[in-house]
Amino acid sequence: MRLAPRAVPSPDASALAAAASPKVTATSSDERDVASAASVVAVHADALSPAQTLRAVPSPDASVLAAAASPGRTATSPDSGNAASAASVAGANAAAPSPAKTRAPEIAVHGVSDKEILFGMAAPFSGASRELGRQMKIGVETAFSQINDAGGANGRLLRLMTADDGYEPTRTADVMKSLYDKDQVFGFIGNVGTPTAAVALPFALDHRALFFGAFTGAGLLRRDPPDRYVFNYRASYAEETSAVVHYLVKVRRIQPKEIVVFAQLDSYGDSGYAGVQKAVRSLPGDNPDIVRLGYKRNTVDVQDAVDALRAYKGQIKAVVMVASYRAAAKFIEKTRDLYPAMIYTNVSFVGSTALADELMLLGPRYAAGTIVTQVVPAINSSATIVLKYKEALAKYFPGESPDYVSFEGYIDGNILAEAVKSVGRDINTEKLVDELERMHDFGMGLGAPVTFSSNEHQGSHKVWGTQLDEAGHYQPIDLE
């Protein structure tokens, strides 16, 4: 925030003498006071909010000092006698400094300037899951660009800084540190992945930085009560897998023992598998544990999972996949001929468009019938929010096709911007969190309003069903 203008305090003798001589640099008492305050702040830095840093207030220049020393004279050529006389007066009064001299330095908010607010995103922009990061970035930037063209948030532009962690948690810590310390971001939006979130989340919490709209439905971001600085738009993996299990059992009439899970061998796969298990336990009857097949993150090495499926002695009619798009496509490719009637379902993290593209390269019979649960409305609908998203996407990213991941990023960006606007110019992390917790029934045309509170940091619990047709297009299906 900016401090209001104030009267320039009377300079001391050394300052006036310096002003009288162009060869000597004037040092104002304000500068010494700020330096002294800065040294005290350095000693007590742990008492400050981690989201805040101190910025020194610039001192008045020589012309201001000279004007204060001799009213009516120019600062460039003061009379030496007047300067000396004024200096003696200033020296006599040095023991009684003006109260204005002791003001605190202006406090600057990390990642916020007069003109912009910086947000960071740690996501894969290389490797097997790079399309997820690329689409999430496009979505958030589409929202920010639209908002900036309309005047920004209280006169400030919203900017996104991105960094590539390759969907590998071993790289995430350095990426988060670089975004926060080097790029000086205010908070984080749209980080991609569960295993990477396990590293990014503690960093954000340690720095009391906002962690908003991550592209994951994992439970570690949905604690009860919620972590103060963590907000999610999307439904959880538990909600997605519960919806698909109930669809398979109640609509498709499949027995729980006829369902297996194909899941990534990490916390993402663990979260999805736990959701399926929980959903099955809620069903009537004595149902066995669900069989889990797996593959290693950032690979398409699914052969062990295929072999395990073939070796299973029971009848399998459906596979719930908790995987990335390339691994999911490879698994379908290797098992479709073995199980022609198999029902394949995926959670939203798979990357719907990327999955459809991979399957259509194999042929329509690999794509047709594949189900993906979504946390946003169908992108081929005519809902208000969908139409606004498509219009903005065409304007700011011409040539890019609508995508479920970028649509989610667009929604994230709009929700966050609405809260930023509501805070006003005097923004910091604590005020923004308070404002988000006051956001109730925010209507975006999603079919259900977005609501947060101090006890609920997940804005939506809605799950939509979609299914690929032979042309590789997603059609809505009723999960109930």
Image: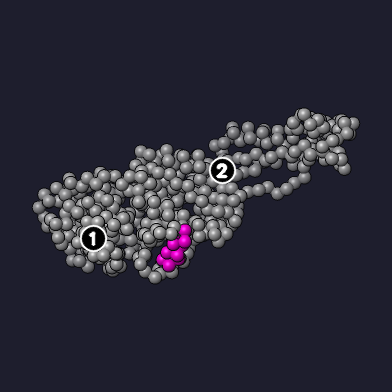
Against 129, is 182 above or below?
A: above
Give the Cα separation between the discs numbered 2 and 1.
51 Å
Contact, mark 2 vs mark 1 (Cβ under 8 Å): no
Q: Which residue does the image show at 42% across and 38% down from the upper left?
A: 174
Quadrant of the rendering where the C terminus is positioned: bottom left
Residue underneath mark 1: 367
Three-letter amino acid code of the residue under disc 2: Gln
The x and y percentages for residue 29 are: 74, 34
What secondary structure is found at the residue carrying circle 1?
A: helix
Asked whether 393 falls inside the magenta stretch, the response is yes
The x and y percentages for residue 337 are: 14, 57
Residue underneath mark 2: 52
The x and y percentages for residue 80 are: 87, 31
Q: Which residues are magenta?
A: 386-396
Front position in the image: 369 or 255: 369
Three-letter amino acid code of the residue under disc 1: Ala
Q: Residues within 10 Å of mark 1 (few under 14, many from 20)?
A: many
